[in-house]
Image (cartoon, rainbow, N blue to C red):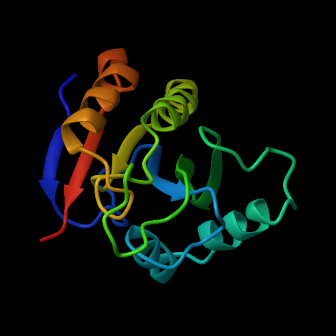
Amino acid sequence: MPVNYVRGDATHPIGSENRIITHCCNDQGYWNAGFVKALSQRWPEPERAYRRWATGLETLPFALGNVQFVRVAAGLCVANIIGQSGIANGRLNHPPPVRYEAIRKGLERVRQLALTHTATIHMPRMAAGLAGGNWQTIAKIIDDELSNHGLQVTVYDLK
């Protein structure tokens, strides 16, 4: 199933079925820039859960490739994917913080939940902003791990 690209806000995912909003987080416990700001304005739960996770208050290891699923409404959850090592520091990062294999592992976990709950997947162009990822590489991972398994994926570009 091809990825659907739309203009809009990923914090307002289209549809009424079960939905998962996925995005890329860092492995440092920082939640203060990029898409997470919009998430926090809409729902406080994903940030609170991420901060608890980052400080060791959750059983799931806070590590690259792991995913924390946070329910924010009936039939809607946010997937905090640890897909970047460190943070961008305003200078050219070499290599950039994105870790493609961690994104792949995280999306495998998202796929499992989406298939179990017949959910659609929604995201910004995750890991291609502050994480410094190449969108073509990330889009290929999305195809491999999600859309090629029959899952409906919508990628949002802000208006």
x%, y% of residue 59? Answer: 87, 47
Q: Is residue 113 left or right of residue 96?
A: right
Q: Is residue 93 left or right of residue 159?
A: right
Q: Nearer the viewer, residue 28 or 71?
A: 28
x%, y% of residue 54? Answer: 74, 62
The residue shown at (80%, 44%) is 60
Which quadrant of the figure contains the N terminus? top left
The residue shown at (56%, 73%) is 31
Residue at far bottom of view:
41
| Relative vertical location of residue 64 with respect to residue 57 in this rendering, above or below | above
Residue 51 occupies quadrant: bottom right
Q: Nearer the viewer, residue 65 or 99?
A: 99
The residue shown at (60%, 78%) is 44
Residue 4 occupies quadrant: top left
Q: Nearer the viewer, residue 82 or 36?
A: 82
x%, y% of residue 132? Answer: 32, 55
The residue shown at (29%, 61%) is 129
x%, y% of residue 78? Answer: 53, 55
Q: Nearer the viewer, residue 22 or 42?
A: 22
Residue at far top of view:
149
| Relative vertical location of residue 130 with respect to residue 108 in this rendering, above or below | below
Which quadrant of the figure contains the C terminus? bottom left
| Relative vertical location of residue 115 with respect to residue 59 in this rendering, above or below | above
Report the label total: 0
